[in-house]
Amino acid sequence: MTSPGTAHTARTFPAERDTTVSLRCAGRTVGRYTYRPELPDRLSPRPYLHPLTTLGGTPVTAFMPDDHGHHLGVSMAVPDVDGRNFWGGRTYVPGQGPTELDNHGVQTHRGWLLRDPDGFVEELSWRADGRELLRERRTVAVRLFADDCWALDFTSAITNASGRELSIGSPATNGRPGAGYGGFFWRTPAAAGQARVFTADADGEDGVHGRTADWLALSGAGWTLVFAGATGDTRADPWFVRTAEYAGVGSSLAWAHRLPIGQGETVTRRIATAVADGRLGRDEAASLVHRLTEGGV
């Protein structure tokens, strides 16, 4: 994918008539990105990647599963932006627990800076209560690793456009221990208890959840995902991991403390993910990490 120059401005392609973009790798369609979703307000409508598959055609994303209807494949989902919910579902209220509130925001597609079969650069607006809180530049690209492995590179640069300082939080920062989710999140189709998760030196949900690691692997029936933080700030964020209740991985922006963003300031995170056929072991997963994070896409 050709990198966009700084002189580009967001635009809408004249031929654009639908609400999705297909992603192709080595001549094969490996995913679809829905950038103008039609979703209920309580799901915090936002663009998402689904379905994504391995090169062999095995699904690696789940969309609106019965256990968590607000899990939308792969998305940027944040439960607390200045008190507004961009995650979907209930909001954790101190002293009250998860509660249905009328506080859902929406991520709105503004235009493309670049759109190719192997990726795109998009501008989005995060809005709630009729006003813009954040402006985002999102870069998504795919590349081939091998006959049985491709990589998804996802960069989110979020700028505070509210006109004042705001902060990002999570249920954990609001009093729910261990629930520091919010940021890049990937929900997989694995059944509860079916997935295996590991890092370079730890295994299992209890061993990796809430901890930092340069990379983390999650495998299910016939597939493996290897997630790697591609910047120092991203590697400093703890991983949010579930395998017992369901299978999903996220990179947490506000694990234990709220993340302040001054007016006009930008927070950037980049996650590169290898999508492989088969169940990889630790050595096989580790061998992919350097290739995932070297250079750009």
Image (tube, rainbow, N blue to C red):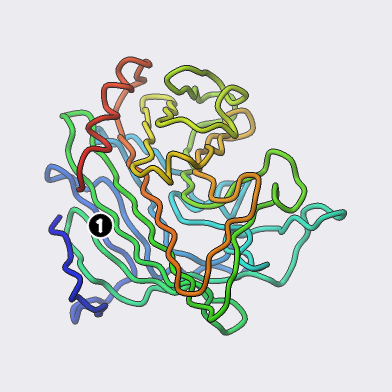
Q: Position of residue 41 (x, y in %)?
A: 60, 70
Q: Quadrant of the N terminus?
A: bottom left
Q: Give, as a three-letter code, the residue at label 1.
A: Ser
Q: Please tell me how crowded label 1 is: few (under 14), some (14-19), or many (20+) other residues with Cα within 10 Å.
A: some
Q: Position of residue 84 (x, y in %)?
A: 64, 68
Q: Residue 124 occupies which quadrant of the picture?
A: bottom left
- Looking at the rendered structure, the secondary structure element under dot 1 is strand
Q: Residue at x 34, y 70 (%)?
A: 19
Vertical arrangement, residue 278 with respect to residue 134, above or below: above
Vertical arrangement, residue 223 with respect to residue 292, above or below: above
111 left or right of 185 in image:
left
Vertical arrangement, residue 277 with respect to residue 59, above or below: above
Q: Position of residue 217 (x, y in %)?
A: 42, 27
Q: Residue at x 42, y 20 (%)?
A: 200
266 left or right of 24 in image:
right
Front-most of residues 171 and 257:
257
Q: Mark 1 — residue?
A: 22
Front-most of residues 26 and 261:
261
